[in-house]
Image: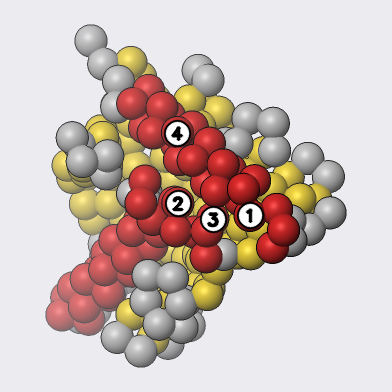
Amino acid sequence: MVLSANAQIDKTQLSLDVSKTNDQNIKLLSTYTWKRTIQGYSEGNLVLNVLSSATMGPDGKPVFQVIEKSGTEKQKSSKKQAEAAEYIKNAVDLVSKYIFMSTGQMVDLFNKGTLSLLNNELHAEAFNFITKGDHLKFIFDKGSLQYKTQDISTQMNGDPVKATVTYKIVDNVNTVDKVVLDLPAKKYKVNVTSTDFAKKL
């Protein structure tokens, strides 16, 4: 079943319902801390390994504090490693803008994007959303309106950035489990994982 133009009221209502669910989820998530690990690979070799503690900031975006950072001893050029680390960090930051969208952006996604219902999933797809040439495909659970996956294709200074985001439920909170990035221009692969969720004391 595809939500057609004549279901415009449903589309607007859905955008509000999903935004509300997302807002409530961010409030719940802001009562937690967790760990984020970024592992960046260049042609199979680990070039970046960063462990950070994370919590939600007052603006509904996560705030990260680096606990431990390391490259690899095999990396001969520290300059090359620094460039790789910077490139990977910028790509992760860019993708985060899509993962943690504002309420206004969520409403825009539903109003401007293409919506479809497939089994128990709600699919939202959009092009040229945050930057020209980007393509988003977000899948929500139809019943709870919680995120299941996000496929993000965008550009960073003309270089393609592709990311697949998978979600998990922790104590009834919908949260990012893993982000896999493909940065083909530099032949980098990046895994970002979220672990050790704990209630703030």
Q: What count of labels does the image hold?
A: 4
Q: Nearer the viewer, mark 1 or mark 3?
A: 1
Q: Residue at x 60, y 36 (%)?
A: 145
Residue 64 falls in image quadrant: top left
Nearest to the observer: residue 56 or residue 24: 24
Q: Earlier in the sequence, mark 3 or mark 4?
A: 4
Question: Compared with residue 141, is residue 5 higher up or lower down, i.e. above or below?
Answer: below
Q: Residue at x 43, y 29 (%)?
A: 25
Question: Compared with residue 156, is residue 18 higher up or lower down, i.e. above or below?
Answer: above
Q: Which mark is residue 8?
A: 1
Does the CB distance between marks 2 and 1 fall below 8 Å? no
Does the CB distance between marks 3 and 2 fall below 8 Å? yes
Q: Which residue is identified by label 2? A: 107
Cα–Cα span, label 4 and label 1: 18 Å
Question: Hey, what amino acid is under mark 1?
Answer: Gln
Q: Nearer the viewer, mark 4 or mark 1?
A: 1
Question: Which quarter of the figure is the C terminus placed in?
Answer: top left
Question: Compared with residue 129, is residue 143 higher up or lower down, i.e. above or below?
Answer: above
Q: Which residue is identified by label 3? A: 110
